[in-house]
Image (cartoon, rainbow, N blue to C red):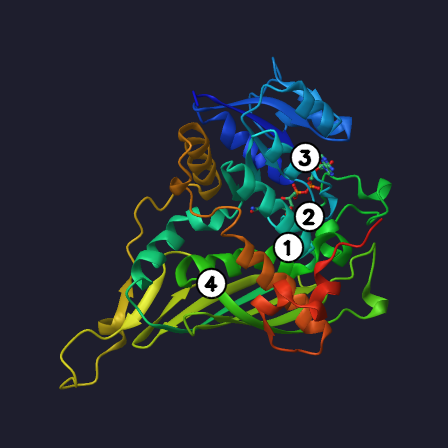
Amino acid sequence: MATPVRIGIVGLGQRALQHLKCLSGIPAAEIVALCDPFPENLEEEKLQGYVDGFTLGEIRTHTSFTDMLDAGGLDAVYFCIPPNRHDGEVIASTKAGLGIFAEKPVSLYYDEAVEMDQAITASGVIACVGFNQRHVPNHEAIRDFVQDKRLVMATTVTNGTLESHSVKHTRTEDLGGPGNRVWAASAAWSGTTVVEAGIHQLDTMRYWAGDVAWVRADYVHRHADDIEDGGDNPYAYSVTFGFESGLVYNLLMSRLRKTFYGDGYSDLMWDRGHLKIEGGSPVAYYYEGPYPPQTQPSQQDLRHEIHVPEPTRDGTRHISECFVRAVASGDGSIMRNTFHSSMNSHAAVLAANASDQLGGQKIDLNSFARDAEYARFRTKPST
Ligand SMILES: NC(=O)c1ccc[n+]([C@@H]2O[C@H](COP(=O)([O-])OP(=O)(O)OC[C@H]3O[C@@H](n4cnc5c(N)ncnc54)[C@H](O)[C@@H]3O)[C@@H](O)[C@H]2O)c1
């Protein structure tokens, strides 16, 4: 396929505006169409507020996805809509032979994601999920560092605040959702914080450590008297992911009211040391001298800052550069995930919700994907 790759963007909200900015600076990409059901999200003046110097020019705008697809002239589509709003658009684009860049999570229901995955596999189009964390230089350097190590346990703590959720661009108030447009706080829209946000941490762990085999979860649910504007997601989440390699990964997240300060860290252990990420460069602690040592090694002897090449490179821009190159060349191996390879991340976080609802049951992901006992968690309710 010749470049520039002709791109349509579906859903012009918070995430798409970031993609619009990055794609506008990628010479091999040409934005040809924008689609959003709410005309205000397609206005040039609004878009310029987020992307300096942006002009619509020849770019088509559509309030109907079908109209955008029927108008043709596209090579690939970015889907940046809330995960509960998908309604066959990915499959229709796939059937039209278009490359797919779908923002995570691609659905709140595993079976719907499977239908998308099967259509993509059948058509052979290039497709990926927006796991930009795989393209963050720190994470790339950690991946290189841990490749020859036997990982045993990892922990991520994310102390999040309720107030840090953004007011989104979807007119949720017109769609039976939260009146304040903070849909990431609502379980019906976001599928819980683990599904909407924790999927990033989990997928990054998969980038380092391979696939997840089982999950077990306990959430601390929000009291009814603390729910405002449909923001009913739990206070806190404790999820354990068991990896096929034997690694056990603890993901601890919270979304607390009136706290205003959020922070977090990750710690990754292998059988001979551990690595910490608390912002800045990752630091690993391990011993590499003769064993046993003559004297107790000092902390300084054990401390190793991980070298991060290109530390300022932007992950969101880089994932799009890779996707655009993949569509142009037809070579999906340039990408760090495909839609298909991302299914394990989706299964893991959706099964975490099921585990919590089943009182912390340990759920094997193969069973979750297949067995009748989990069908009610996988199936999208008919509207
Ligand atoms: N990868 C990341 O780092 C990252 C960051 C933020 C959001 N996201 C994901 O991006 C997706 C969108 O989130 P957001 O923050 O941009 O939300 P948002 O509400 O700000 O934007 C969504 C946009 O989609 C439009 N929309 C809704 N339904 C639509 C439909 N059926 N067809 C076309 N347009 C539709 C809305 O009008 C809105 O403009 C979510 O899945 C979210 O989890 C990913």
Q: Secondary structure at mark 1?
A: helix
Disc nearer the start of the sequence (1/4): 1
Label 1 near ligand 1 (CB < 8 Å): yes
CA separation in Å, label 2 and label 1? 8 Å
Between 52 and 351, the one nearer to me in the picture: 351
Which residue is tagged 4? 211
Disc nearer the start of the sequence (2/1): 2
Which residue is tagged 3? 11
Q: Which mark is residue 366?
A: none
How many C-alpha atoms fall within 10 Å of the one at disc 3: few (<14), some, or many (≥20)?
many
Which residue is tagged 2? 83
Label 2 near ligand 1 (CB < 8 Å): yes
Q: Are marks 3 and 2 in contact (CB under 8 Å)?
A: no
Which residue is tagged 1? 196
Residue type, numbered disc 3: Gly
Q: Are marks 2 and 1 in contact (CB under 8 Å)?
A: yes
Residue type, numbered disc 4: Asp
Q: Are marks 4 and 2 in contact (CB under 8 Å)?
A: no
Q: Are marks 1 and 4 in contact (CB under 8 Å)?
A: no
